Amino acid sequence: MKLLLVIDMQNDFIDGALGTKEAPLIIGALQKKIEEYKKAKNPIIFTRDTHGKNYLNTQEGKNLPVEHCIKGTAGWQITSKLDTEGCTILDKPSFGSLELARYIMEHYADIEEIEAAGLCTDICVISNAMILKAALPETPITVDANCCAGVTPQSHKNALEAMKMCQIRIAG
């Protein structure tokens, strides 16, 4: 069984406070991938970057002073262009999520492969891929480059190269 991890495909990262021109371009390919996983009855987990109203007072907020993904706002929502029905949605308060790794180890002990996609390649995708590689070193992890976008095209490429060096397979 393969698990699809869709990271932070939220409005604020697509066309909101931290949107990029590349982010909307991956939605079509990601829609197809989600359909394939659903058709094969493979599990899908969506993550949501989740911050509170005190975001600007947090370490992340001090380093990136752009309010985004504030719980309950439109920007926090996963884009309606992706089908989340029947999928698990996990909120995460930071780039990488130890809770996500624990959840996967607890609920999907028999998982044969994890495939990751989403936003941003160079921040949350790489953080979670690395955490999962550490937590599940014998589970193959693949990142689909065509279903990811970074803060910039160059930082996207840099993140893909860094993951490749850590034995995370890069597809696409």
Image (cartoon, rainbow, N blue to C red):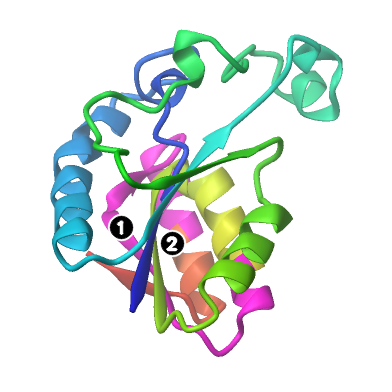
Residue numbers of the magenta segment? 132-159
Q: Position of residue 164 (x, y in %)?
A: 46, 74
Task: Return the residue at label 2.
Answer: 160
Above or below for 97 versus 51: below
Relative to 129, is 45 on the left or the right?
left
- Residue at the (57%, 45%) spot, across then down: 123
Badge 2 marks a residue whose secondary structure is: helix
Q: Position of residue 125 (x, y in %)?
A: 50, 52
The CA distance from mark 1 to mark 2 is 7 Å
Type of the residue with mark 1: Ala
Q: Image quadrant for the N terminus?
A: bottom left
Badge 1: residue crowd in 10 Å (few <14, some 14–19, many ≥20)? many
Quadrant housing residue 95:
top right
Task: Return the residue at label 1.
Answer: 145
Relative to 5, is 162 on the left or the right?
right
Along the line of sight, the residue nearer the viewer: 56 or 79: 79
Q: Position of residue 34 (x, y in %)?
A: 22, 51
Q: Position of residue 43 (x, y in %)?
A: 35, 62
- Residue at the (61%, 80%) spot, across then down: 136
Above or below for 62 versus 127: above
Relative to 100, is 16 on the left or the right?
left
Along the line of sight, the residue nearer the viewer: 73 or 148: 73
Type of the residue with mark 2: Leu
Is residue 106 on the magenta stretch?
no
Above or below for 128 versus 166: above
Badge 1 marks a residue whose secondary structure is: strand
Badge 2: residue crowd in 10 Å (few <14, some 14–19, many ≥20)? many
